[in-house]
Image (cartoon, rainbow, N blue to C red):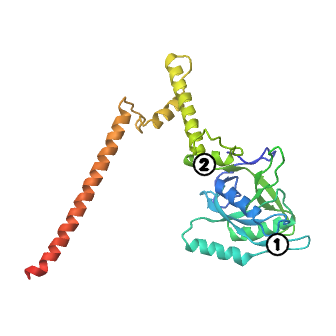
Amino acid sequence: MSLSGSSSALHLSLPPTTQSRPPTQINVHPSVIASILTHHSRRPDSDAPRVVGALMGQRNETGTEVEVRSCFAVPHSEDAEKIALDMPFQQSMVELLSRSGVKEQVVGWYSTSPTVNNYSALIQDYFTNETSPFPAVHMTVDTNMTESGEGLGVKGYVSMPLGITSKPENCIFLPIPVAVKFASSERPALDLLTSSAVKPVPSAQPPLAALSSSLNQLSTLLDQSLAYVQSVNTGSAKADPEVGRYLLEGVGRWTATGSEDEGGVKEGLQDTLTVTYLANLLRSQIELAGRLTLLQQAQAPQQQ
């Protein structure tokens, strides 16, 4: 799901090379955006123009695609004359995360401001040194929302040097696409979070309104699938092989070899029961062997 709005920028996919190239795609997990919004809502100074933090993630082999999986806040202060970033705090957090077994690395930084300025160039220069030899990515989150619900735009940038003199503030930010990436199992939770405001639940409805809504949605999808299958069988609709494979995979009748049989679901259930039986039998054998060993060790001193 793409987050960035319409853009006139031209994105070129360059051929692979041994040198690092600027990223052309940013994939961000929804929890990262939620963490950024939480950081902004809990900022100490409510009049602060923005908050900043580090983005943690991984890159692909060519470095052209960045996957942002987590983030953490970095204290900073800025005014019309100067900006201060707590660099020791950021470095200590990265070291602490690496000690705790986190595999993600610093890939860039974020801010809750829809625009970039000279201070953004200075922060970008610092994080570029942190992500060297790869370029750092910059992600902005627009926290301003209108009455019509518009807002919360997420955009991504990479920086390029500009001018003859090499200075940190002499750079230009180039936009790159940003997309949300999540597992299919996380979709119901995201739908619940992004749904409209929760309405008062009447007394006639069950107490678990969210579960009831999910079951009703599932029932509607099943009815749509059944109607599609019936229309294909009657010949009123054209069959789509991709949809057919997806439905067969959902009911457990599609295998890697492409074979289909009417008893696929029953055979899958029998296989599951067989594996469960063998696992219980193995567990019993191990427990029996352990008890016999303890009995033998207890009888050894008596025989001596």
Position of the C terminus by quadrant: bottom left
- At horizontal 58% and vertical 36% (from top left) the residue drawn is 217
Image: 50 above or below 195: below
| Residue with the most extreme left position | 303
Identify the amino acid type marked 2.
Answer: Ala
Looking at the image, can residue 288 be seen? yes
* Label of residue 189 in the image: 2
| x and y, in percent, of residue 300 in the image | 12, 78
Tell me the element at label 1: strand
Query: x, y (%) of residue 136?
Result: 72, 63
Locate residue 269, reporting x and y percent. Answer: 35, 40
The image quarter containing residue 85 is: bottom right
Looking at marks 2 and 1 on the same chain, the residue that comes earlier in the sequence is marked by: 1
User: In the picture, residue 88 is in which quadrant?
Assistant: bottom right
Q: Where 145 sits versus 83, above or below?
A: above
Please give the name of the residue rendered at 16% of the width and 76% of the height, measured from the top-left corner.
298
The residue at 57%/32% (across/down) is 220
The amino acid type found where label 1 is placed reads: Ser
Name the element at disc 2.
helix
Check disc 1 and report the residue beneath it: 77
Residue at the farthest top position? 235
